[in-house]
Image (tube, rainbow, N blue to C red):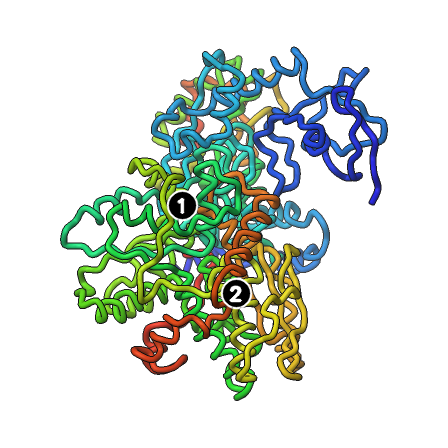
């Protein structure tokens, strides 16, 4: 590692070569404001807010795009830079509507924060707004071009991190907009609804479709029996909205908050993550031992990923696990198994899912298989961000709540279920149960370090009683291409598949950094949330899905065995090629 | 429909050109130039075809198409009327010519008449400032144009 010695405001800094000045300043606890820069993305130098001075030079440098150099001496703050930055903010505001109170980012907007910190009290420049309508074509996210400050984060996320290319800079100069090709509605574009654009947008130009009011109406409707499930990743991120450190596990408080919100039953998606493992694990073992079905088997829990595969790699649909996502499985057993057991008319059940993800809003109506119970298996999806707002608006003092438990019979979970929320977790959970299915015994050590970590693509070999299982994990949609091309090539040339089992999650780090999670997600935050889930796993009484007593119960009382006819009807689905552009 | 289809068939020469440029860096602009040369504009169908042939996201192509004014995404009229709005022509009343032509043809700048006969385009300096204000129709240049002359000029092409 090459170390560079430099100075920030006279303070010596040692930093790895190749870092930028923003990172160097951070080392001595100096924050340089920036609107277009995001640590997930390459520097773009669009906003001009991060300008700094080099000592003894009249030149202004952009801290985001300037790499550190030996002996560089940088001034980050002085009267002149203060004025320049204030002017930059005022100029951005001259093309930004003054509608903070009704904005989806009120209170979390980065521009609003800087305007407040710099004490902007007037708009000295003529205001020129873009006159374009909101794009509400998808069920997941809303694009509001009037709010766009043209920082370019969304385009970069969509292209570089996700490899989707739904968004692009269209037009030039002050006429530039972030839009799909040919100014098509987002829903007709390749958009996979992952919502990473909304998670990275510094302002209110892209945000999740807010459905909190629908929830409030549902719980106050006496004819509705509202049941809620919460996803694994929500429990380690929601706390951030209440100033807890990232990764703090708040499962018990979430259950309690939901009861205070007036829901009839509180269930957990972790239960059906265990159910997914039973189905998907059995499916994998069946493919491996009978030779029937395409190898590698690829996970299908992530709706953004399945959408991507259907659009960009439809020839690999046979490789998809037919198992539905945990959310959809939970919905299906809620309106059948639970309804029967509790004696509630499924027509009255209103099934809500709290998810870290915007694509989940799309998934509930992706095709007819999502109504396996005869009704919409999941009626409403709220993201973690919406859920946090709901708790606050309902006057619930979240941090003071006493921990509660989830309801039976579809609320208990094993550690395997909880790690579904992070990259490598589905793989690890599946391997724990696959080992048991193949050998009839449980793993001595269920911590499978080989599949953990943050590299975009990881691969390894797992030994199950002499059976060498080649596995790979990819996260961040743009990383999946190389893996799929490798598989495709082996298939087309008649070679042995390079892998047996592959896990894919669309978002970097997995669901813990989903498009619906609290803002300001960086790799540091990702690591904390992932650590939170592994802690939850380690603290669980049972670590493997097949050991979950409620899972054993549902098979005994209702489903029979994994891949049974009933399981197929409720818990499995099919995939179909979709056009990359609908029009 | 049959006419539409024919319009979007790439000639052998165009396909050969794209194949030749396929692997070269900076190929997109070269290819788009060539497509526009062939069709007079770049339709959505043409853009789709280029995306497929170059194995490039459609969004990238539209990013470039919409950046350069040179590229047209709407089929121009049979006679494309270019009104110079460069500094000299503008000062000499180019904008008044725009108003008058907008009135006469019932279309805005960038529009095409319903019968597909005329389109209006504002352009920057066409290189004959001494003749300002200038309009150009299909390569024919009209200098020192006044509002009153416009109906006569248009009738030549009707």
Mark 1 or mark 2, which is nearer the start of the sequence? 1
Asked if marks 2 and 1 fall on the same chain, the answer is yes
Residue sticking out furthest to the left: A223
Distance CA(mark 2)–CA(mark 1) = 26 Å
Q: Which mark is drawn over residue A573?
A: none
Please provide percent x and percent y for residue A471: 62, 71
Q: Position of residue A431 (x, y in %)?
A: 56, 73
Residue A561 image-quadrant placement: bottom left
Which residue, given by chain and number where applicable, does mark 1 sit on?
A141
Name the element at disc 1: strand
Q: Residue at x 49, y 42 (%)?
A: A199
Q: Farthest residue in the bottom direction?
A: A290
Looking at the rendering, in which quadrant would you find the N terminus of chain B? Answer: bottom left
Out of A452 and A113, give the one closest to the viewer: A452
Nearer to the camera, A476 or A253:
A253
**Does residue B89 sit above or below A26 in this rendering?**
above
Q: Nearer the viewer, mark 2 or mark 1?
A: 2
Numbered disc 1: what chain? A
On residue A426, the disc is 2
Using the rendered image of the protein, determine whether residue A506 is visible from the camera's viewpoint.
no
Query: Residue at 74% across / 20% down in the picture?
Result: A9
Q: Nearer the viewer, residue A45 or A466?
A: A466
In the rendered image of this protein, does residue A199 appear above or below residue A369?
A: above
- At mark 2, the secondary structure is helix
């Amino acid at each position: 590692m090459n170390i560079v010695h430099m100075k920030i405001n006279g303070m010596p800094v040692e930093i790895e070569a190749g870092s930028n000045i923003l990172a160097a300043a951070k080392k001595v606890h100096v924050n340089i404001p920036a609107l277009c820069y995001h640590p997930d993305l390459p520097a773009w130098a669009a906003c001009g807010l991060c300008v700094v001075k080099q000592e003894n030079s009249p030149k202004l440098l952009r801290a985001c795009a300037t790499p550190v150099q030996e002996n560089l001496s940088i001034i980050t703050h002085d009267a002149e830079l203060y004025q320049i930055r204030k002017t930059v903010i005022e100029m951005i505001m001259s093309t930004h509507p003054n509608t903070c109170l009704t904005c989806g980012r009120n209170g979390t907007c980065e521009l609003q924060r800087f305007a407040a910190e710099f004490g902007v009290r007037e708009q000295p420049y003529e205001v020129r707004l873009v006159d374009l309508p909101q794009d509400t074509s998808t069920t997941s996210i809303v694009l509001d071009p009037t709010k766009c400050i043209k920082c370019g984060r969304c385009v970069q996320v969509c292209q570089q991190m996700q490899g989707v290319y739904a968004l692009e800079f269209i037009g030039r100069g002050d006429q530039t907009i972030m839009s799909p090709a040919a100014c098509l509605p987002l829903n007709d574009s390749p958009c996979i609804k992952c919502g990473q654009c909304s998670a990275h947008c510094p302002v209110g130009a892209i945000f999740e479709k807010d459905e909190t009011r629908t929830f409030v109406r549902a719980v106050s409707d006496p004819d509705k029996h509202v049941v809620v499930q919460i996803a694994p990743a929500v429990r380690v991120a929601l706390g951030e909205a209440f100033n807890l450190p990232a990764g703090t596990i708040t499962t018990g408080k979430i259950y309690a908050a939901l009861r205070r919100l007036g829901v009839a039953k509180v269930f957990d998606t972790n239960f059906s993550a265990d159910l997914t493992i039973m189905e998907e694990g059995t499916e994998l073992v069946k493919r491996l031992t009978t030779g029937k079905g395409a190898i590698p088997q690829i996970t299908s829990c992530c709706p953004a990923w399945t959408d991507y595969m259907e659009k960009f790699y439809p020839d690999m649909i046979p490789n998809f696990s037919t198992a539905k996502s945990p959310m959809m499985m939970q919905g299906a057993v809620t309106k059948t198994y639970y309804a029967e057991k509790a004696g509630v008319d499924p027509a009255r059940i209103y099934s809500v899912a709290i998810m870290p993800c915007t694509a989940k809003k799309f998934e509930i109506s992706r095709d007819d298989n999502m109504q396996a119970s005869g009704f919409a298996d999941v009626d409403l999806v709220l993201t973690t961000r919406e859920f946090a707002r709901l708790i606050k608006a309902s006057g619930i003092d979240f941090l003071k709540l006493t921990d509660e438990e989830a309801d039976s019979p579809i609320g208990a979970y094993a550690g395997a279920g909880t790690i579904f929320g992070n990259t490598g977790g589905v793989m690890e959970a599946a391997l724990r149960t696959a080992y048991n299915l193949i050998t009839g015994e449980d793993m001595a050590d269920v911590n499978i370090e080989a599949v953990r970590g943050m590299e975009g693509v990881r691969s390894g070999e797992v030994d199950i009683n002499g059976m060498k299982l080649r596995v790979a994990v990819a996260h961040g949609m743009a990383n999946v291409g190389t893996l799929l091309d490798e598989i495709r090539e082996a298939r087309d040339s008649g070679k042995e598949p390079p892998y047996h089992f592959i896990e894919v999650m669309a978002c970097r780090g997995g669901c813990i950094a989903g498009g619906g999670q609290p803002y300001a997600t960086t790799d540091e935050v990702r690591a904390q949330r992932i650590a939170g889930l592994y802690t939850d796993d380690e603290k669980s009484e049972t670590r493997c899905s097949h050991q979950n007593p409620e899972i054993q119960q549902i098979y005994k009382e209702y489903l029979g065995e994994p891949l049974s006819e009933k399981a197929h009807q409720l818990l499995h689905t099919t995939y179909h090629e979709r056009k990359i552009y609908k029009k | 429909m049959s006419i539409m289809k024919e319009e979007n068939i790439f000639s052998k020469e165009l396909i050969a050109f794209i194949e030749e440029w396929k692997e070269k860096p900076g190929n997109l602009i070269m290819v788009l130039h060539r497509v526009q040369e062939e069709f007079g504009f770049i339709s959505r169908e043409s853009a789709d075809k280029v995306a497929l042939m170059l194995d490039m996201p459609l969004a990238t192509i539209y990013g470039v198409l919409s950046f350069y004014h040179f590229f047209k995404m709407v089929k121009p009229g049979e006679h494309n009327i270019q009104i110079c709005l460069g500094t000299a022509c503008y000062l000499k009343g180019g904008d008044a010519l725009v108003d008058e032509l907008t009135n006469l043809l019932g279309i805005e700048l960038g529009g095409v008449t319903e019968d597909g006969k005329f389109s209006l385009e504002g352009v920057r300096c066409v290189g004959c400032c001494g003749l300002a204000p200038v309009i150009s129709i299909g390569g024919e240049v009209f200098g020192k144009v006044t509002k009153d002359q416009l109906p006569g000029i248009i009738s030549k092409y009707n």
